[in-house]
Amino acid sequence: MKLPSLCGILNRLRNSAGYHLTFFKCGDGFMSGRLLLAFALGFLVASGTGNVTAITIVEEGEPRATIVVRGAVLESGPYKPARYDAGSPEQKVRLAAFDLQHYVQKMTGAKLPILSDREEFDGPSILVGASGRTDRLGIKIPDGFTIERREEEYMILCRDNTLVLAGNDLAHYHGTPYAVYELLNRLGVRWFMPGEFGEVVPGMKTIRVDAIDFHDKPDFAMRNWWLHATPEMYAEEHLWKLRNKAGPVVSVKIPGDGSVNLYLPHDQFDEHPEWFAMNADGTPIKSMPSLSHPDVPALVANAIKKRLVVRLKRDDLPPVSGGIMRSGPAGQHLSIGFAPADGLPVDFSPETMKINRGFAGILGRAGVPKELSISEEWFQFVNKVAEEVTRDYPEVIISTNGYANRDLPPEGVSLHPNLSVMYAAIWADTLHAFDNPRSWHGALQGQIIKRWCELNKRVFIYNYNEVNLVSLQTPVPTVRRLARNLPLLKKWGLMGFMDEARNAYMEHGITTRYTRARIYWDADLDVDALLEDYFEKWYGKAAAPAQAFWEAIDDCIENTPMLGHEDRILPYVYTASLVETLEHHVADGEHLADTDRTRLHVRVDRHILEHLKAYMRMHDAEFAARYEEAVRQADIMAEHRVALHEINPFFTTPESTDPDKMRLSVAYFWNLALRRAHYQKLHDMTSGKTGQLVAMAPKIVKFSLDEANMGKILQWHAPAYDRSRWRTIDLTRPYYIQGYMDERGVPYQGLMWYVFELDVPESAAGNPVHVYAPVVNTEAWVWVNGQYIGHRKYLESYWRPAPLNFNITDSIRPGSRNTIAVRVGTGMNRTQAPDGFQGRLFLYAPTAQVAP
């Protein structure tokens, strides 16, 4: 049932019956379809009795109701946000009760008293959490905690002058806080960003709630992400998750990279090297178990069980200790997690290689042994460990990751029922939905997830929702991707999410992070209604242009044929017409915003837009070989980041050479400072400081594919070779978007040749001359005037800088035209989308030593 029709039903009933309906009035805020239907039905029952209002909480600014909690709640300490420690049930109820009191007072000015269930009072009562009063009323509060991790639930019950807001608060569940935040959300309170900055609290004099009996459960049991933040920002973000019904505490141990080391018999490495994995050269690997030796699963399982014994006996240990997570009453529900080291770990021992199926991993290149998928041998090994552990601990969850060379579901291997698989597709397109016809990545990833869910009922995804792993924090909203993917994931039976993220609201936008939190609870969320509510409340009269601004970017992202998880694709995704459109929308918003707050929110969008413009100008300058201008534009980008950080640090944390501050910015690789330094280096190499430009190649050069690997034999590099039938290509754009993708968007894979005809001035004689290109991937071989110069080794497609740099002094001919041929190999991994050339080749005469 659609939201407008339900709103219409409620409004017609209210108008015809003449009842004052505060809580369920559609204007009070966005409701998901399933929740609004429940409230509508509740109203219909109440209207039939002629008694709509079940409780008055505040009337004309005066408190009428009392908040009641069980006595132990008021005696407990405050709730403390923590990644693994959810706190006690009493602390959760305390948080819920005091937040209810706080926000009701902010809305109405009335402070509701909070009393113990042992105290007597007259008047309406709001029962927060289970208590003696709920027991006496015979109200069954949701509870329970099992290995299935599916018991999370809350309820809102209103009748006879009593409002019950309660839920399952065991272990990592936060049912009672969710009930309170659901009520506040219905009253119009919003938490669009962490902290007070992101709150929207409406003013009202009276709060009445009608009769209702509503229960709600999440579609996904795990709804979390982690990020680097200051302690203050972490606490704010933790509470923000709760208030939007995300899950701030994990319920299954995350199998961290290398965590299998916790359970390996390292003290017997010298005596029993056969218990450890083997390198290709036959040497043992101390950090990796043998995946085929019959004794090793029991050794690992016994090490796990020893830690479990300690874990169960030691109540003073933190919730996560020794690689084991304790949760649930009395700590009886445990989970452990283990995984091999990051990268592509392989056990090359002969017995393990007999198990290996010979499939290349998604990240691997066919024919490269180190890049084989090891899913079959790894999950057979994990099964054996699980069988040993669960003999003594039948309710333990054992998690491992389907990541790197284990992300393909194993063929011919069933998974132990106590396993949980964390699927992490670091290779995958982060921009498009699984069913977007423009993304073969998305289709592939979706089918892999579906298969994992068929094999295991506790699959959770480790999403990379930064949005791009390598990024300069230009805007990349992915609301449409979320809206398409979440119903599919629910249908496939996914358990949930434990994502990697960063505090960069300037990049993903408020809309993406807010939608993510809400849709992780309700996969069938009416996202259009959610966004309409957000833009209206956040931007006021500037809502329409602000919404058009963010939707124009999302539309651009959704419809690009380019795939990836690094921003190297974005200069070709954003367009001049998009920037012009965005300027129009922001200017309209600046004109319409009529309060200090809405003007500030539009100013945020202005900074995001100006930062994007500088990003585009920086790349335009780079591709025009105006490197000094690229440096200047990088500085402009940095200025807008500082301005956004000063407005609110959740928008971005500026880069710093201080390791702690750099951690907060999550900009370790190819960040703005590194790119600025790179452009400065190129300027110095070509302007006289460390070198002098000799010749700059044009953007357009001769180009040919070499599908059959004939070019070297046929001497395509020779100056006299006839290239009249060759095509041309733009050096500043990835080769595949220039006509070298198939109908599915899969790029050409193999060899290709770029040939340059450059006039070298006579003045270059007597000077050393080098050939340089800023980015060539993934592998390159160079000839000058028919003479072989050298080989630039294979570099992963994302690697930056990825220069080609050779001394060609002895092969160059000053005063004449010179032929430079570059044979480029894409590598055998299409998912990485290698670019070929991405920038202008040039010749320079070094005047000082230049780093590669």
Image (cartoon, rainbow, N blue to C red):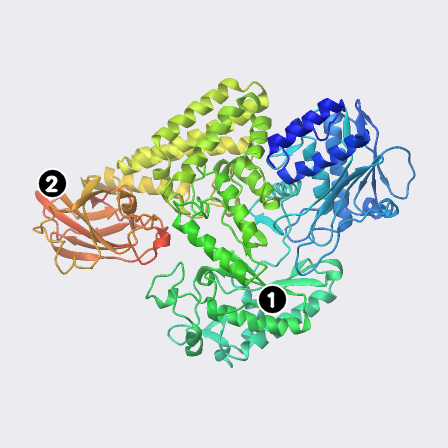
Q: How many numbered marks have been drawn onto this rendered protein structure?
A: 2
Give the vertical position of 309 relative to 739 (above or below): below
Q: Within the image, what quadrant is residue 700 found in?
A: top left
Give, as a three-letter code, the residue at label 2: Pro
> From mark 2 to mark 1, how far is it between C-alphas?
72 Å
540, 410: nearer the viewer: 410
User: Counting residues from the N terminus, which is met first, the one under dot 2 or under dot 1?
Assistant: 1
Side (left or right) of 751 relative to 316: left
Where does residue 50 sit, x and y in percent of width and height?
A: 81, 28
Where does residue 723 sit, x and y in percent of width and height?
A: 12, 48
Residue 183 in sight: yes
Where does residue 703 sit, x and y in percent of width and height?
A: 19, 47
Where does residue 600 sit, x and y in percent of width and height?
A: 55, 25
Contact between marks 2 and 1 (CB within 8 A): the answer is no
Give, as a three-letter code, the residue at label 1: Pro
Q: Within the image, what quadrant is residue 253 found in?
A: bottom right
Residue topped by disc 2: 761
Q: Which circle, 2 or 1, is nearer the viewer?
A: 1
- The structure residue drawn at horizontal position 34% and vertical position 66%, both measured from the top left corner, is 368
Image quarter where the N terminus lies is: top right
Q: Residues within 10 Å of mark 2 (few under 14, many from 20)?
A: some
Give the vertical position of 608 relative to 314 (above or below): above
- The structure residue drawn at horizontal position 85% and vertical position 33%, both measured from the top left corner, is 124
Residue 196 in sight: no
Side (left or right) of 354 relative to 711: right
The disc placed on residue 417 is: 1
Side (left or right) of 777 relative to 761: right
334, 758: nearer the viewer: 334
Check disc 2 and report its element: helix, strand or loop. Answer: loop
Check disc 1 and report its element: helix, strand or loop. Answer: loop
- The structure residue drawn at horizontal position 9% and vertical position 41%, both measured from the top left corner, is 762
Q: Residues within 10 Å of mark 1 (few under 14, many from 20)?
A: some
